Image: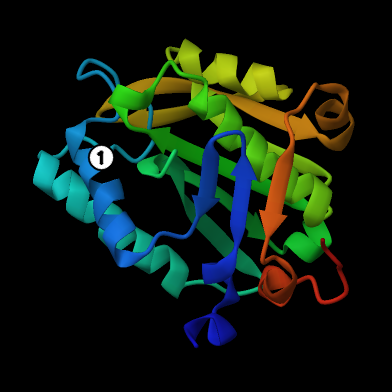
Amino acid sequence: MITEYFPLLGLRIEVADLQLRLPSPEELGQLADAAADGVHEPDMMPFTVPWTDQSPADRARSVVTHHWAVLGRWTPQAWSLPLAVLHRGTVVGQQTISGKDFAISSECSTGSWLGLRYQGRGIGTLMRIAVAHLAFEHLGASDLVSAAYLDNPASLRVSAKVGYQPDGVARHAVQGRLRISQRLRLTRDDWLAINRPYVQVHGLQACLPLFGLLDQTSA
């Protein structure tokens, strides 16, 4: 079975009515459909790489090819896990968690997007909590880092709900103009201080070597 060679295909995270997992080919198509339908309002750009500034068909195709490319580059020293987010069985967006030399740094970064039609329902907060739980409670992370542009208050509010704190700013050139992003950091202590819903993680044990964690144990 393919999971013997790439056990991440059997990893599941469940919180409330969400499930996060690597998508099947059909679900990857549904994820592409969600991107084609729109990720943000036309007058904003929340991404440093403006991948949404394409036609709906090209935007959808980029989701598919990027997903394959990210998994194809996986090593225990540098990895990125692009999880599809399913809400009551419907693919609504993507939540990624990444690590570089994680066994030494114990730091992960996160990034996400949610289909425009599914925003404003609390899904964004839950999907961030799901991967934070994976990182802190199962992988032994000490910190998570993320970022959002200052003109994206919705994303900044989600980060604040999860416990992220400001961690400086960064300057970017995006689409020919200056954009200022707020760097964010979530420490283990800040994570433990927030009220969190119950999260379940399944199928992690066989995946630990792929995260560079040979001696960790997990429920």
Q: Which quadrant would residue 199 be assigned to in this image?
A: top right
Return the residue nearer the eye: 43 or 25: 25
Return the residue nearer the eye: 39 or 148: 39
Residue 183 visible:
yes
- Residue, disc 1: 35
Q: Give percent across and percent down for residue 201.
A: 69, 54
**Residue at x-position 31% and y-position 57%:** 28
**Residue at x-position 66% and y-position 74%:** 210
Return the residue nearer the eye: 160 or 103: 160
Q: Give percent across and percent down for residue 116.
A: 30, 25
Three-letter amino acid code of the residue under disc 1:
Ala
Q: Which quadrant would residue 173 be assigned to in this image?
A: top left
Return the residue nearer the eye: 207 or 69: 207
28 to the left or right of 100: left
**Residue at x-position 39% and y-position 40%:** 93
Quarter of the picture containing the C terminus is bottom right
Q: Give percent across and percent down for residue 100.
A: 66, 60
25 to the left or right of 82: left
Q: Residues within 10 Å of mark 1 (few under 14, many from 20)?
A: many
Q: Give percent across and percent down for residue 13.
A: 62, 50
Q: Is residue 67 above or below residue 19?
A: below
Q: Is residue 165 above or below residue 104?
A: above
**Secondary structure under the numbered disc 1 in the rendered image:** helix
**Residue at x-position 86% and y-position 67%:** 217
Q: Is residue 26 above or below residue 191?
A: below
